[in-house]
Image (cartoon, rainbow, N blue to C red):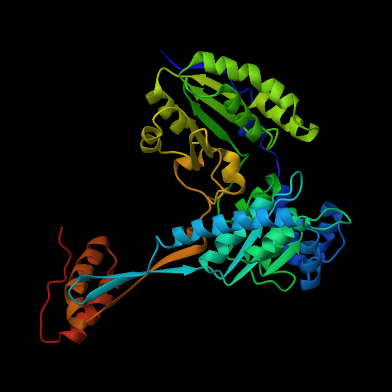
Amino acid sequence: MTREYLKKATLTAESDASETHEIVKTILAEIEEGGDAKALEYAKKFDRYEGNVLLTAEEIEAACALVPEKLKQDIQFAHDNVRRFAETQKSTVSDVEIEIVPGVIAGQKAIPVDAAGCYVPGGRYSHIASAIMTVTTAKVAGCHHITACSPPRPDVGVNPAIVYAAHICGADKIMALGGVQGVAAMTFGLFGLPKANILVGPGNQFVAEAKRILFGRIGIDMIAGPTDSLILADATADAHIVATDLVSQAEHGYNSPVWLVTDDRALAENVMALVPGLIEDLPEVNRQNAFAAWRDYAEVIVCADREDMAACSDEYAPEHLTVQAEDLDWWLSKLTCYGSLFLGEETTVSYGDKATGTNHVLPTSGAASYTGGLSVHKYMKIVTWQRATREGSKPVAEATARIARLEGMEGHARAADVRLAKYFPDEEFDLTAHG
């Protein structure tokens, strides 16, 4: 049996690629040239906001006071989970050293970047969880300065819950600035901020393009496209839960792909019948996004067996991958390409998006085939060092000189020669290239 598409996407992320490059390039150049004043000009134009850009301690305190106590407890719960998971991740990387050969010691150090810029979306949805995910991991990594940046709403400012989350998670500064101007301010060190060494966090196509343009000049977590999710389900899956989970991810945006891969045609047909009603039951703004995403980007695929299901999933390399099938350990060992994996009906992408502790800033558009998501490691540089005794350097110098000459790099060879001549003046060495 070959794969059968009961539903095939009519559009892809590439179909919707906006011509934003020149717009973003121009804005970045103008802000770099014009500094704070130009950034404020764009804030007035795009954010329609003329309030304070860098929140004062008093403004932060006032915003925190507006957050209901129950929501504060929920944010703290999520923060604690993300912090614990990040601390565990950090423990997997340590400083090490090894004596490569007698007298030659090499080592590794894990050094956090100095300044991190965390972008927190606040447009269509106020991404409280993104503040938790990005700021907490930067703090655990040991970054010396963390800026949280979120777009303000006209005459209102940054959502108080975002301010509260960024504050308790360890942000040193909170900035009311959106889009490209926010990214530029963190990159160029405007408004008295240190220049960011790394930018992290999700955003719209303009934020993503700004990060793409600036990558190399600074570090970024990843170049992200629309969020995507895939569910692997067999005959044991609950069709209503599968359909609900698909709709829950489709509401992210009109171009957010969701995919169902199964070996049970009856389940697939049942899920397809349920989805429209679940979408219709959503609030209007969510309904519009989910309807468009399901109509244009969603796919339902029937495979021959679970081996083919796993292979199909790895080909898609989804950002979020859910398994609602028997023998979860088999799937855990078999699957290799995903941003984050959710095993069993008892968990869901929504848990990971908000409160489980694993990070929700994840690779999209197939990037999970070669990279993972945001973690404490993204804020850390793994660097190496070495030292040697004179006796220990002797065989290394000999090998270096001969290899360098074989490559035609005489300067490299002579850097080894002079040490041998100085340390061992009474010895002769064969330092000519062989081969």
Residue pictured at 26% horizontal, 74% vertical: 105
Counting the numbered discs, the total is 0
Picture residue at 16% right of the left edge, 68% below the top: 432
The image quarter containing residue 245 is top right
Vertical placement of 247 versus 336: above or below?
above
Q: Position of residue 375 (x, y in %)?
A: 51, 55
Q: Tell me: residue 387, above or below residue 158.
A: below
Quadrant showing the N terminus: top left
Task: Please give the name of the residue rendered at 71% of the width and 27% of the height, measured from the top-left corner.
Answer: 292
Residue 151 seen: yes
Q: Residue furthest front?
A: 70
Give the quadrant of the C terminus: bottom left
Location of residue 56 by image quarter: bottom right
> On the rendered structure, is 137 left or right of 159?
left
Q: Is residue 200 visible?
A: no
Image location of residue 23, percent across then percent down:
74, 49
Quadrant of residue 186 in the image?
bottom right
Residue 122, how many percent across, how many down?
74, 50
Residue at image position (89%, 56%) is 155
274 or 229, which is in the foreground? 274
Residue 139 pos. (x, y %) = 57, 66
Q: Does 328 sit above or below residue 388?
A: above
Query: Is residue 241 shown left or right of residue 25?
Result: left
Left or right of 301? Residue 279 is right
